[in-house]
Image (spheres, grey):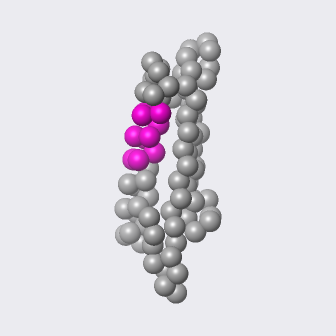
Amino acid sequence: MLLKGKSDSELELVRYFDSSWCGDKSDRKRTVGYIFFLGGAQISWNSTKESVVALSSHEAEYITTSGACYQVVLLETMLREL
C-alpha cells in the first residue's frame, strides 16, 4: 500500500508475519507474530500463543495469514481516514 504525504512523497506499508507450527510440545499450540512498518517506522506488532491447535503447518500458516490480513485491512482503513 502506498500513501501520498504532504510533500507528495510515498509512504509504503510493509508487513511481515510468521507462525511456528506446534511450537509448544506440551499443548501443541503455535506462536504467531506480525509486524508492520510505515515509511520505515514500526507502527504495529504482536506476538502471541494462539488458543487453537492447528492440525498441519499449512493450516497454521492459513490461520496466521487470515489474522494478518485482518490487521492489514484495519491499518489501511485507519491510514486512509487520517
Work out whether 66 lies above or below 11. Answer: above
Up-down relation of residue 65 to residue 15 (above or below): above
Q: Residue at x 55, y 49 (%)?
A: 16
Q: At 50% across and 62% down in the image, what residue appears? A: 13
Q: Is residue 37 above or below residue 82?
A: above
Q: Is residue 29 magenta?
A: no
**In the figure, residue 48 lies in which quadrant?**
top right
Q: Quadrant of the C terminus?
A: bottom left
Q: Nearer the viewer, residue 81 or 5?
A: 5
Q: Quadrant of residue 81?
A: bottom left
Instruction: Point out residue 11 in the picture as x, y percentages from the top left corner.
Output: 52, 72
Q: Residue furthest top?
A: 26
The spot of residue 67 in percent (x, y) is: 43, 41
Q: Residue at 43% across / 33% down in the picture?
A: 63
Q: Which residues are magenta?
A: 61-70
In this rendering, does residue 51 appear at all? no
Is residue 62 within the magenta segment? yes
Q: Of helix, strand and loop, which mostly describes the magenta segment?
A: helix
Q: Position of residue 43 (x, y in %)?
A: 57, 59
